[in-house]
């Protein structure tokens, strides 16, 4: 079974290389006019069928200002046929050839497929904050050695959550230092709004009446594997922990969107962004969600029974032992540590605040406006 899956992934990678290196560059050159279309902004994503949360606020802001023509391309490349995939990518290239701005928030093959014109500015918002586990060209798990072509090519601006993250992104993407700008991450703006936090609390209480008055623990593990073959670890350990906790603690399970398509383990219809404002304790392993959660200055717990193995296989940019929270590696200690951390909430706030300042200082609730101003200058 694993051999079949690996073969399928390899075939997809070679198909990607063929499309990226042969077909799309030709389409781009054939469609390229003498001049760009001033004010044309393309928003695109290959992992969602609708606007992803990482760019939603910027899409709204650019449309609100009404002096740009906005074209949107949202598809889940893993779920559509190869024929439709080609059709959509070719259509994108026709607009790409004349756009003033192209905005993406994850790996997006068509953007990197050609030698783009200098008049077009490509903005990579990325979909996560900070830099925790290694990614991109810093780990063989993301980009196979046989893959030809830089998947991060043509980026003019990559927004990062703080100056301290820029060097890690530069290493992972192999792009010039000037590309990485600590403007912050657009999707975090809502976390600074009292109205958003209040509405999330009200929505949570309506959809989870059994949890009202209880301490809320959110388990949000990292994404593992490939988009075509994601893997979920430690689920059985978390279920066992739930049965060992007092009744005044409610555990919410929320897995990565790619994992949610394969595993039906989520016990909440709310998004992770909607759950963060109501969470009293975050449990994760190696997910970048810890950066967003640090905005709330609440306690974290890292359940990482395979910490040593994962560190060797994947690698970290940060010292795992210095993360702002309690590290647990044995399942039999998990429930007791959850109870202890909740009862001691606030005792490590200084450590959490220092972590926020180091890796999230660009996120201040004004990121979207700051970036839109730059686009409209």
Image (cartoon, helix red, strand yellow):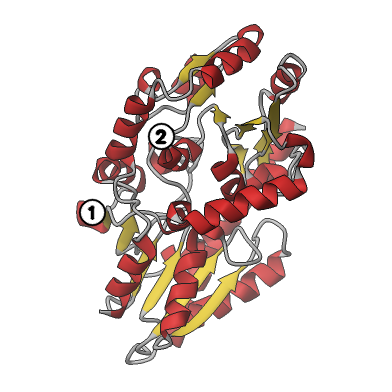
Q: Is residue 368 left or right of residue 253?
A: left
Q: Outermost residue toward the left?
A: 178
**374 up-or-down from 200: above or below:** below
Front-lying residue, 83 or 342: 342
- Helix, strand or loop under label 1: loop
Q: Residue at x 28, y 72 (%)?
A: 374
Question: How many labels were placed on the picture?
Answer: 2
Front-most of residues 280 and 266: 280
Classify the position of the C terminus by image quarter. bottom left
x and y, in percent, of residue 269 in the image = 74, 48
| Residue count near mark 1 (Cα–Cα under 10 Å), binned few <14, some 14–19, many ≥20 | few
Residue occupied by mark 2: 132
Q: Which tag, 1 or 2, sits closer to the chain's start?
A: 2
Percent x, y of residue 248: 71, 24
Q: Secondary structure at mark 2?
A: loop
Quadrant where the N terminus is found in the figure: top right
What number is the disc on residue 190? none
* Residue 215: image location, x then y, percent: 63, 29
Q: Is residue 10 above or below residue 354?
A: below
Q: Which residue is mark 1?
A: 176
Image position of 227 (left or right of 180): right
């Amino acid at each position: 079974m694993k051999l079949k899956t690996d073969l399928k992934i390899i075939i997809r990678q070679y198909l990607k290389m063929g499309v990226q290196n042969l077909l799309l560059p030709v389409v781009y050159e054939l469609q390229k006019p003498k001049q760009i279309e001033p004010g044309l902004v393309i928003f695109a994503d290959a992992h969602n069928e609708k606007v992803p949360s990482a760019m939603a606020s910027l899409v709204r802001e650019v449309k609100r200002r009404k002096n740009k023509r906005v074209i949107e391309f949202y598809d889940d490349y893993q779920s559509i046929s190869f024929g439709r995939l080609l059709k959509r990518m070719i259509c994108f290239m026709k607009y790409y050839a004349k756009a003033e701005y192209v905005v993406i928030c994850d790996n997006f093959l068509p953007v990197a497929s050609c030698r783009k014109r200098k008049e077009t500015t490509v903005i990579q918002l990325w979909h996560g904050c900070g830099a925790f586990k290694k990614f991109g060209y810093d780990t063989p798990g993301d980009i196979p050695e046989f893959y030809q072509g830089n998947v991060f090519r043509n980026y003019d601006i990559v927004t990062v959550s703080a100056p301290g993250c820029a060097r890690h992104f530069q290493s992972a993407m192999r792009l010039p230092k000037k590309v990485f700008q600590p403007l912050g991450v657009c999707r975090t703006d809502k976390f600074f709004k009292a109205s958003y936090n209040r509405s999330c609390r009200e929505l949570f209480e309506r959809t989870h009446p059994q949890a009202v008055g209880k301490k809320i623990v959110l388990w949000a593990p990292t994404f593992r594997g490939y988009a075509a073959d994601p893997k979920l670890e430690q689920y059985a350990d978390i279920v066992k922990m739930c049965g060992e906790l007092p009744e005044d603690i409610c555990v919410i399970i929320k897995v990565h969107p790619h994992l949610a398509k394969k595993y039906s383990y989520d016990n909440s219809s709310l998004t992770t962004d909607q759950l963060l404002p109501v969470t009293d304790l975050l449990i994760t392993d190696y997910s970048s969600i810890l950066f967003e959660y640090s905005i709330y200055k609440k306690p974290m717990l890292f359940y990482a029974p395979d910490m040593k193995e994962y560190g060797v296989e994947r690698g970290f940019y940060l010292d795992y032992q210095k993360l702002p929270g309690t590290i647990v590696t044995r399942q039999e200690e998990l429930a007791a540590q959850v109870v202890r951390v909740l009862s001691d909430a606030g005792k490590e706030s200084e450590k959490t605040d220092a972590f926020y300042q180091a890796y999230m200082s660009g996120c201040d609730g004004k990121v979207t406006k700051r970036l839109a101003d730059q686009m409209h200058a």
